[in-house]
Amino acid sequence: MSGTAITSSPQQLPVLPKDLVSIDTLEYLGFDEETAEFIWADRIKELVRAHATKPDGNLSTAFMSQVVEHVYDFGHVSNTCDDNLRLWHQCLNHCGLDRQTKAAILDPVFKKIRLTQTCLHWVRNTIELRFKALQDLRAAEAAASVPLKRGQADESASTDAVPCPSQPEETAMSEAVLRASQSPSDTTVTLYKGVDRASVRHLFDDRRDLSRISALATFPPGNARGSSSAYYLYVDRDIAEQQACYIRRRSSLTPVVLVQVRIQKSALEAAYEGPQRQELYWPSEDWKRLAFYCRGNRPVPPDLAKYMEARLSIVTAVAKADRAFTRNMNRLDQITETMVLKNKHGKDAIQYCFRRRDADYFLTQHAELKMLPFTEDEFQAWCVDAREEELKDIPELPCRVVSGGFNVDAAMENADEHDGLVV
């Protein structure tokens, strides 16, 4: 694969393609050589030829659309969300991913987050993250190569930088930030979400004031919001840390941040009163029923409508993808505690779900937001700590994004011997 190698100790970063639309880019996205050549011949070559005769400026968009179509065409038959490593391995093989990308997606350190979505979801998300990172890098290079006019501000740095009200020393795992997060408060609620930095680039304006809160919104599905978009924020910081680090694990050029949202309890109580606020926890029957009907894409009974209509729902988080509720599930008694997302202490994870159309204004007015970046050292340290905690009895399953790290084939050979790899 041709291009410019980017090296950075201690990681081996990918070889970057020269052209955004190329076979090299398909390999950079995570496809093996044979699949990259097939996608190029089957879908992209004619697209490039047509664009050359009639340019429309959307070649990159059309390119990614074809790549995603390939993933779904070849992977949909074997798509899975089961806790079975062999099924995931099969789906990734059908998509044509290379060994390193499969290792990143299947890294056991991130199993908890991985099982909240399907295999094809993570394949698509991974290639989209990588392509966006490549686009941002090329845009920054192009901006840096243009000489500045007298009096013109240097905007090249802003292509990658995100305005943030935090002080530079405040990072996701810095001592002061961790100490503050471990100090309970009687007057505030602190919530978290792990995201890629580019997705929240416009969260703050140039004056570092909260500007576009919608950058944090999540679109359906969702067990307490039905078809409405909403803000899903975790009480449990470790879940959000894992969200962010799983992004970084799968796309080594993608910077990630931990978004911290602090809200006065008095403001929450004043804005969300009575039926506008609903709480629903495992193992209540209503939690099981709402998960069964809503996540299973079934008509929701009228007596559960209050949860769908609430402007704020505080719920036990679901650990499984919607597919788990729609395939081979036809009875309420099939909803078990395995459907509950757990934090690192084994406790039920709690999620605040704000209806977006109401929460846009509320969060803009009442939430104190910080974007806490993960440094490279913090990411690596997080992986080491997580591996020691979760995988202490499973040898040689490193989290580092390096060649020869988590060995998918070795894991498959030993899958039946180790609890937690295959159930």
Image (cartoon, rainbow, N blue to C red):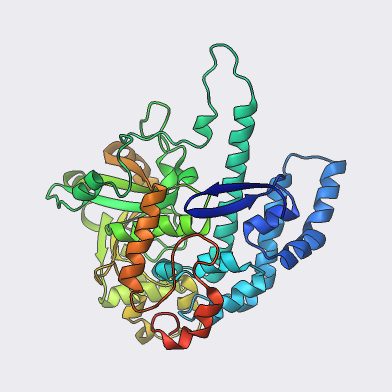
The answer to whether one can see residue 265 in this image is yes
**Is the C terminus in the top left, top right, bottom left or bottom right quadrant?**
bottom left
The residue at 28%/46% (across/down) is: 174
Whether residue 231 appears in this view of the structure is: no
Q: Closest to the observer: 211 or 255?
A: 255
> Which quadrant is the N terminus positioned in?
bottom right
Q: Quadrant of residue 111?
A: bottom left
On screen, residue 361 above or below 413: above
Residue at the top extreme?
150
Residue 205 sits in which quadrant?
Answer: top left
Picture layout, residue 133 above or below residue 31 = above
Percent across and percent down for residue 405 are 50, 67
In this view, the residue farthest toward the left is: 186
Residue 203 vs residue 48, the one in the foreground: 48
As rendered, which of 214 and 172 lies closer to the eye? 172
Residue shown at 64% from the left, 24% from the top: 146
The reply, left or right, for residue 75 in relation to residue 243 is: right
- Quick check: 262 left or right of 23? left
